[in-house]
Amino acid sequence: MVNEMPEIITAQIKDRIAKGLREYMEVSGLDRSAAIRNLIERGIKDWKLEIAVSEYRDGKISLMKASEKAEISIWEFLDELNRRKIPINISMEAVEKSLGL
């Protein structure tokens, strides 16, 4: 595991977001910094998934590339596609290639 130097970020947020942050801190039991880090990480993870799903749905990237882009397993990505009722687009050629045929 590589130790990353933390980067200090300062941001101004609207009152409704600050209220939501305080509520999250209360429920999660996290201090302000940990709560902000957690929410940012979750937001980035969700954003990566949205991009990967969108590009896969539009036929821009393969199933494998989409799962890599979302930083989840193919199985998790397939579950997400199923949850969103997005059809799986895979050719027989891709299936044969993945099976080593």
Image (spheres, rainbow, N blue to C red):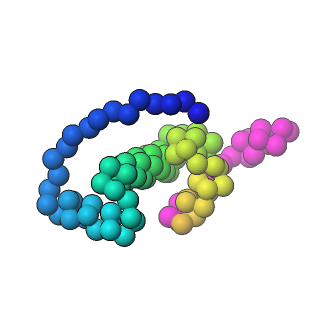
- Does the stretch in magenta take in 94? yes
- Does the stretch in magenta take in 16? no
Total marks shown come to 0
Task: Name the residue at 60% across, 61% down.
Answer: 79
Q: Is residue 75 above or below residue 92?
A: below
Please state the horizontal and vertical placement of residue 78, each as a whole percent of the image.
61, 57
Q: Which residues are magenta?
A: 84-101
Please state the horizontal and vertical placement of residue 90, each as a whole percent of the image.
66, 49
Please state the horizontal and vertical placement of residue 14, each as a whole percent of the image.
14, 56
Please state the horizontal and vertical placement of residue 57, each as a whole percent of the image.
50, 51
- Can residue 58 be seen from the camera position used here? no
Task: Name the residue at 46% across, 30% down.
Answer: 4
State which quadrant residue 98 falls in. top right
Split into 4 quadrants, where in the image is the N terminus? top right
Q: Nearer the viewer, residue 32 or 11?
A: 32
Task: Name the residue at 75% across, 45% down.
Answer: 95
Q: Nearer the viewer, residue 89 or 53?
A: 53
In the picture, measured across the screen, residue 22 lies left or right of residue 96, that is left
Q: Nearer the viewer, residue 54 or 34?
A: 34
Q: Nearer the viewer, residue 49 or 10?
A: 10
